[in-house]
Amino acid sequence: MNKTKDVFITGFALFSMFFGAGNLILPPFLGFKAGNDWLLVTIGFIITAVIIPIFGIVAHAKLQGTLFDFGKKVSPLFSTIYCLIVYGICVILPAPRTASVTHEMAIAPFFNSSSLLTSSLYFILVFIFVMNRSKVLDLLGKYLTPIIIIILLAIIGIAIFSSPDTMQSTQFKTPVVDGILEGYQTFDAIAALVVGAVLIISINLKDSRSSSEKKQLIFKSGLLAGFGLFIIYTGLILIGALHNSEFPETISRSTLLLGLGNKTLGSAGASLLSILIALACFTTAVGIITGTADYIKGVFKNSQTAYTLTAVIGCFLGILMGQFDVGFIIDVAIPALMFIYPITIILILLNVIPEKWASALVFKGVVITAFIFSIPDFLKILMPSERLNTIIDVIPLAPYNLGWIFPALIAFVTLNIFQKFNLSNAS
């Protein structure tokens, strides 16, 4: 096949698996609240919703394995537990959220049907796609993603050139930090590990090219998907900010996006936006369930029964959780994200950098440090207390839910110096 065509199809497929429910409803609302500080929140959002995830795809290109390979330098037991937690979170939260968003924005405005019916039909279709996983890349890359991108660019372009003259001031005290934390809610860093593994297996199923050629394909596809995410996220944040004077402060994420669609595309806006939402959400759900089923299949020695059973369980959980409101699922996700995101970011970064700086000792030390210093962020949401606030005030960046960053960096530098010193003495 033509190599450039392969890159575009694979890159589009990757983009569509990233671009789901949160990716649609979060950026406009972030821009709406940011107002004149929209550029600062965009910088923060891009860090956790584009740069880190694309580093995850680059790490996949380097490893060309599974999610298990990301943490095996810490220990095989750690990596197994980490994989089960990540896939568990993905199946219980972001995958069902795609069905919930589809119902609230694409079904409920037009049909008087229950959310249970929507999530049931939705995940039956997801199951069909997952069971035809060899066709997933082509279906997503050739057909669904271009439609998503065209509709989105139309909304963004019209909204930019038809915006009012006034813009409300920001509601954020620390816009960059708020952008970083809102980027957590996209689940994109976790998605990079999950859908990256789907990408590897999909390429291996249909391709006989060499390891270096596959690495180039994954790397270039990742950059293409990252560029697409950057353009769309920036555009959505910008139009949310430009039009923030036209909507009430109490507006919800979903209602804001629907309002922007109607303002930009007129009477056809709701219908087109409904198609966009359904497609974007669906492709992400397919990517998540496929990735989870692939992993469990690998654990059980490539058992197709294990793959099918995992897909059934994943879709069943999707039906159960997908009935709930989007806002409820987002709120429930916050503690899980505060727990798993720091470790995920550390594993991605350590797998991207040269191996001479990322030994098993460095992996162990930095991951453990990040985990320990992320505990206050996790506990603060589950059970806030004055004693916990006293601890948080002592740790740099902890009041902003980023207390793990400096300790992890110090551990990284210290352990590398220690290793270099030991090697020098040994020689």
Image (spheres, rainbow, N blue to C red):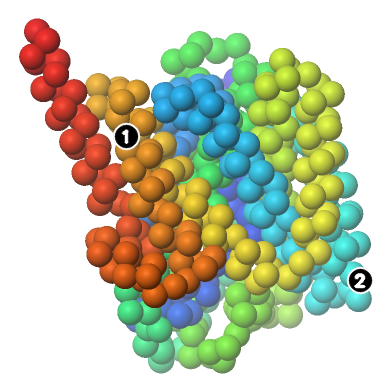
User: x and y percent of residue 352 in the render?
Assistant: 36, 32
Read off the residue under disc 1: 365
Please identify the quarter of the rendering in which residue 376 is found: bottom left
Q: Residue at x 48, y 59 (%)?
A: 378
Q: Is residue 188 visible?
A: yes
| Quadrant (top left, top right, bottom left, bottom right) of the C terminus | top left
Q: Residue at x 73, y 24 (%)?
A: 297
Please identify the quarter of the rendering in which residue 303 is found: top right
Taking the image as shown, residue 162 lies to the left or right of residue 286, namely left
Name the amino acid type tagged 1: Gly
Precedes in sequence: disc 2 or disc 1: 2
Read off the residue under disc 2: 113
Q: Residue at x 64, y 60 (%)?
A: 21
Observer-nearest of 150 and 312: 312
Q: Residue furthest front?
A: 387
Taking the image as shown, residue 203 lies to the left or right of residue 240, namely right
Q: Is residue 50 above or below residue 306?
A: below
Q: Is residue 231 above or below residue 300?
A: below
- The mark closer to the camera, 2 or 1, is 1
User: x and y percent of residue 313 in the render?
Assistant: 82, 41
